[in-house]
């Protein structure tokens, strides 16, 4: 008998039929003697509907009141899910985030979980209930309803699994696992049986949308065994996210290729090469709450330097305005330019640690296709390059082939 | 400075525009220096949508889980209402029933309020907030979400007004007050400036749908000053429900005429006239949870009696089945018959107490129109008659005229 937390996203609870399918799957686990906690998102579309409704009243909705409204999405789903289980003769009971209680800080719309009171859930599990918990939401110490921000239901699932010391946290999505890359771009992409936590973290942060990065971080921190599965298929073991690198010879060098076309590049040319320049450029950007991803600085020959970084495409104009109005004159930069026709392609794998030449193979592969590399960023298990956007699919395909990811 | 509780029903919050209107009205009260607590229902149609969704999953929805779902309707409205107030620059804060806390018993879908913790609301009012509370819902002592049943938002408003010792509880509806009768039937019907609590209670129980009878009972018990107003008109004082009868000569004998075509008549003919017969007939009806309204028993000449009572039309067949299968043979009744083509018309007024001849005037008026009276039921301030349904509108019109209700 194991204790399993299963998290189902919005598409898995999109309508009554899918909720009944979900209940049937839970019933199968229950029949095997497992204890099951189910975490559900709002029915797909519901959260956006509620946000749009709020904006009709208040263009920039009050965060506390928005959380009051938006949290109803999951509250409806937990009721429906519990009823679907009861309809199959399974004892079930629902809890909102406030009822559990999942205590968070008071940062409305992007709260962080502080602790979870698992007493009620444990008592219910021991009494034979399937416990259904609303994802994405919690309550602060003053009793205010909070939400965890987009993808927060994954975090709820992982946090509950950690609190309950569950044997496994299963994340049900509309794909049947983590792939070497997006099968829509590379049809030969292969589902990974397992992937290390570090690799998953890199893939998530580099643009793979299978799991939210916060939930992966949470799983890492509390050593929660995560498994990604399809809610639309009866069979399949999905992808297990492990904490130990399996020390066998067969381990591939590269586990997956991620990509991201949401970024834009900002270049500051001809900056005097002196200490403090990076701070003078990026300080005002950070003050405006603009997230920066890759940062590169090259020293030029004439005592000046070129400074380049990437931001989300939606924030490119804001970043350029800040640099032109507040920074350029101040630091004496020659030119400020932006480019939103870029894409980032990353190869990720713990195998890189013990294999030299991975970077050079990546660069050679891209060069052979005539793809120019504009920026490079590396970590111990990742190499990311920024290239012209129109070459993105090509780059992913040739790298997938070059690193033999299609073979098992 | 007064403390006012304002309750807005589903049609008053049906869309963002109406919620903005509501906020403007609250703003005007606030500008006059009043403290305001707003109680809102779910947007019209929302509760039915959620119940229908639940029934797709579980034809006879689990009451606890149904309450979890259905309570989200008001939760959305409190968020929207608070935002609409903030958008006008007014400090506002929402509370669900659980957050207040409005503690109820555990009778899901028809819970009764046990007590209200007014500490948070008082503190917020003193800090200058308009407090927006979800109607219709509460929380039991175990933290389960409960709902009060249809019309429960009125009860929430009155209960909050009682707990806060509010100066007035204003019920905003789609009519601008309590009328002498339904203006759709008698165009000359006149809005009452005031009506006594007892009269309102009789009118509500006799079919007037302006106020839910439970909220009127609650107001009576806690001596809450109730006022019924239109949420669609800027001006007007609505109808005040008072506790003292104004002792002036001008007081009309009759305050209003109510009617109800939801009832059906059940007749048991030729029952032996012996003690215990009424219990033998009505006991099985009560056991089946069928509510009985008027009950009449006439002694016949031949040692038998005829027994007649009314039930809701929807339960007529169930009542007839019970009588035919479980009662008729047992008590030796000659015949059991049902009639759902009836209507009940009631005249209500505290003036009856001091005026003789009201009943005879009512009966004469109906006789002059050739309307036969099938059943009569009276209380100290009410006379109700059951007549053939097709004469209902006619009866209401001639009684309205006979008792000069159109004149001020």
Image: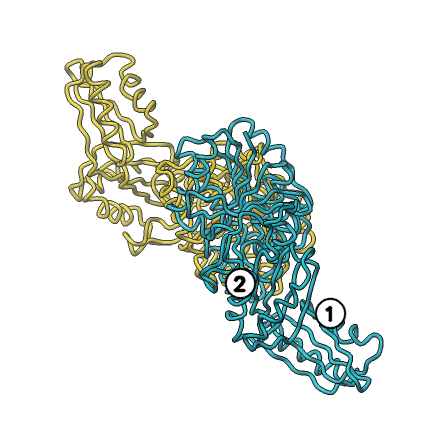
Chain colours: A cyan, B yellow
* Place of residue A280 in the rendered image (x, y in percent of width and height, measured from the top left): 79, 75
Q: Is residue A349 above or below residue B218?
A: below
B388 or B44, which lies in front? B44
Question: Within 10 Å of the Cα at label 2, are there few (<14), some (14-19), or many (20+) other Cα atoms?
Answer: many
Q: In this view, does A175 lie to the left or right of B126?
A: left
Question: Mark 1 and mark 2: span between their CA atoms?
Answer: 39 Å
* Place of residue A380 in the rendered image (x, y in percent of width and height, measured from the top left): 70, 59
A64 or A97, which lies in front? A97
A302 or B105, which lies in front? A302
Check residue A400 in the rendering and tell me which mark sits there, or answer none: 2
* Place of residue B75 in the rendered image (x, y in percent of width and height, measured from the top left): 52, 49
Q: Earlier in the sequence, mark 1 or mark 2?
A: 1
The nearer-to-camera label among 1 and 2 is: 2
Residue at the right extreme?
A275
Identify which residue is drawn at 47% across, 30% down: A32
Q: In this view, does B85 lie to the left or right of A271?
A: left
Check residue A112 in the rendering and tell me which mark sits there, or answer none: none
**Which structural element holds mark 2?**
helix
Chain under disc 1:
A
* Place of residue A335 in the rendered image (x, y in percent of width and height, measured from the top left): 70, 86
**Which structural element holds mark 1?**
helix
Please state, as top left, top right, bottom left or bottom right, where the N terminus of chain A lies in the image. Answer: top right
Identify which residue is drawn at 22% across, 42% down: B365
Q: Is residue A5 above or below residue A105?
A: above
Q: In this view, does A131 lie above or below B82?
A: above
Chain under disc 2:
A
Q: Are discs 1 and 2 less than 8 Å apart at CB?
A: no
Are both tags, 1 and 2, on one chain? yes
Q: Is residue A4 visible in this depiction of the protein?
A: yes
Q: Is residue B198 visible in this depiction of the protein?
A: no
The residue pinned by badge 1 equals A287
Question: Within 10 Å of the Cα at label 1, are there few (<14), some (14-19), or many (20+) other Cα atoms?
Answer: few
């Amino acid at each position: 008998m194991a204790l399993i937390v299963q998290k189902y996203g919005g598409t898995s609870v999109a309508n009554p039929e899918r909720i009944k399918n979900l209940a049937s799957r839970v019933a199968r686990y229950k029949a095997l003697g497992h204890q099951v906690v189910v975490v559900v998102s709002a029915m797909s579309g519901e959260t956006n509907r509620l946000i749009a409704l709020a904006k009709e009243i208040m263009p920039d909705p009050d965060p506390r009141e928005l959380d009051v409204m938006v949290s109803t999405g999951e509250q409806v789903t937990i009721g429906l899910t519990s009823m679907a289980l009861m309809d199959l003769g399974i004892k079930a009971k629902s809890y909102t985030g406030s009822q559990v209680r999942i205590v968070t800080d008071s940062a409305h719309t992007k709260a962080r979980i502080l602790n979870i009171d698992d007493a009620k859930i444990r008592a219910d599990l021991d009494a034979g209930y399937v416990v259904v918990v609303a994802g994405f939401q919690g309550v602060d110490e003053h009793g205010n309803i909070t939400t965890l921000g987009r993808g927060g239901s994954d975090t709820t699932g992982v946090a509950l699994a950690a609190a309950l010391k569950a044997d496994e946290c299963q994340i049900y999505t509309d794909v049947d696992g983590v792939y070497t890359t997006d099968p829509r771009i590379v049809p030969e992409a292969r589902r990974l049986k397992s992937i290390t936590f570090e690799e998953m973290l890199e893939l998530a942060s580099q643009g793979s949308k299978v799991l939210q990065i916060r939930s992966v971080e949470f799983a890492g921190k509390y050593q929660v065994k995560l498994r990604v599965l399809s809610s639309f298929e009866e069979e399949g073991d999905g992808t297990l996210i492990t904490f130990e690198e399996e020390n066998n010879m067969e381990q591939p060098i590269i586990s997956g290729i991620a990509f991201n076309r949401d970024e834009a590049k900002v270049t500051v040319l001809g900056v005097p090469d002196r200490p403090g320049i990076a701070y003078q450029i990026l300080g005002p950007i950070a003050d405006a709450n603009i997230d920066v991803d890759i940062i590169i600085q090259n020293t030029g020959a004439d005592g000046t330097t070129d400074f380049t970084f990437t931001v989300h495409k939606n924030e490119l104009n804001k970043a350029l305005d800040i640099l032109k109005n507040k920074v350029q004159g101040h630091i004496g930069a020659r030119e400020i330019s932006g480019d939103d026709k870029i894409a980032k392609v990353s190869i990720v794998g713990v195998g890189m640690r013990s294999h030299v030449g991975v970077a050079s193979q990546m660069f050679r592969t891209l060069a052979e296709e005539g793809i120019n590399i504009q920026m490079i960023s590396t970590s111990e298990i990742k190499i990311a390059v920024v290239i012209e956007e129109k070459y993105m699919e090509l780059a992913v395909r040739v790298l997938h082939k070059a690193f033999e990811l299609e073979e098992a």
